[in-house]
Amino acid sequence: MTSTNPSTDALSLIDVDHVRFFVGNAKQAAFFYAMTFGFRIHQVADLTSGNRDRARYLLTQGNIRFILETPLDKTDPAADEIRRFGDGVKDVAFTVEDAQAAWKQAIANGGKSAYEPLTISDEHGSVTTAGIQTYGRAVHSFVSRTGAYAIDRVKQGSMFEPGYRPIDDLALNDYNEANPCGLMFVDHCVGNVEEGRMNEWVQWYEDVMGFAMFKHFDDADISTEHSALMSKVMASGNNLIKMPINEPADGLKKSQIQEYLEWHDMTAGVQHLALRSNDALGSVGELRRRGVDFLCIPETYYETVWNRVEKTLAQHGQEAIKEDYDRIKDLGILVDADDEGYLLQLFTMPLQDRPTLFFEIICRRGSQSFGKGNFKALFEALELEQDRRGNL
Ligand code: FE2
């Protein structure tokens, strides 16, 4: 299926420019993500660099760029959002050729502006950003860059935008360089929307962004005995990013999507970011060593998984799993397979006190899907945790 909207040329996405989080204390959050996930605390824009409205930390790893942002003034609307939602993702930003043109096109396609085009520049170059509103509290910024701020330069370590200063001489950065976690880029970004609104947002991504339903995935009714959800995967034209959208479905007990919404002021938002690794065992091993808490996978999962995955791979003439089975099990990693190969994945516990945002570590060996075969096992594990929090 392809986009029905021809007016999306200006919206051709070059890269995931960055993911921006609203957090209560950017300085401290920076150290959490650096220590646990191995990010480099790369640059900062705060009072010390002349920024008096918000503090922003740029964290980098591979082609992942996070901005951790904290308002410095109580009247800043971001302060209100943090009170309502806790820490979480505000913005999934895309690099484009011309941010203003992309923003105009998205609005012409039926999108709603989140903020108007804004250019900041200095003698080294310029960065233009403009935002549109997506589900709930989330926005998509379009970012176009020139000179020293061009995305290729930024990837090589150049300054992110005017107003930032580099962070040098940080022992933690040296430590992370010597002990890499191997996270390469944002593989997908999942949103939770309110019950009954998934198809509306699927349509929105088609109409406004020119995304299309990802061909490897169709409507799936994913349910356990107790709770359920519906999920559809939208992908950008060049498959640069996939954005699955979940809505809660009725179950005997509370859906995990419903739990998210209830702790997120009944407002849609980003549920998880999947970060790609090419070495699941290495990455998860290092992350565990650093104290990342992952979902506990029930022992019983490994009694059936090998048969299920091997059978699927053999059926489609795909190569067998090359990772050591015992190490996969010891590290508590999930495995799934489809007609194109297999994948290894694992989900962290919530990254903040509220059970909202979490990360997924994903390693693809041919498979382009999302671990559908793991949903049942995953939900059973999630429900165990939900029960422990008294939210089931
Ligand atoms: Fe995922």
Image: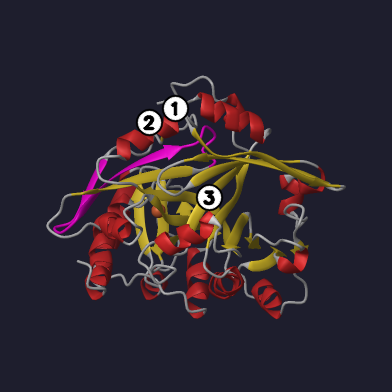
Kindly identify the amino acid type of the residue bearing the numbered disc 2. Answer: Gln
What residue is pinned by disc 1?
Answer: 207
Residue ID for mark 2:
203
Q: Are marks 2 and 1 in contact (CB under 8 Å)?
A: yes
Residue 232 on the magenta segment: yes
Most extreme residue toward the right, as rendered?
123
Residue 357 in view (yes/no): no
Marks 2/1: CA distance? 6 Å
Q: Nearer the viewer, residue 300 or 197?
A: 197
Which residues fall within the magenta stretch? 220-240
SS under mark 1: helix
Q: Residue at x 47, y 62 (%)?
A: 82
- Give the SS element for disc 2: helix
> Are there few (<14), some (14-19), or many (20+) residues within 10 Å of tag 3?
many
Name which of mark 1 and mark 3 comes first in the sequence.
3
Residue indicated by mark 3? 91
- The percent position of residue 335, horizontal first and vertical second, equals 36, 59
**Amino acid type of the residue that numbered disc 3 sits on in the rendered structure:** Asp
Q: Is residue 356 left or right of residue 91?
A: left
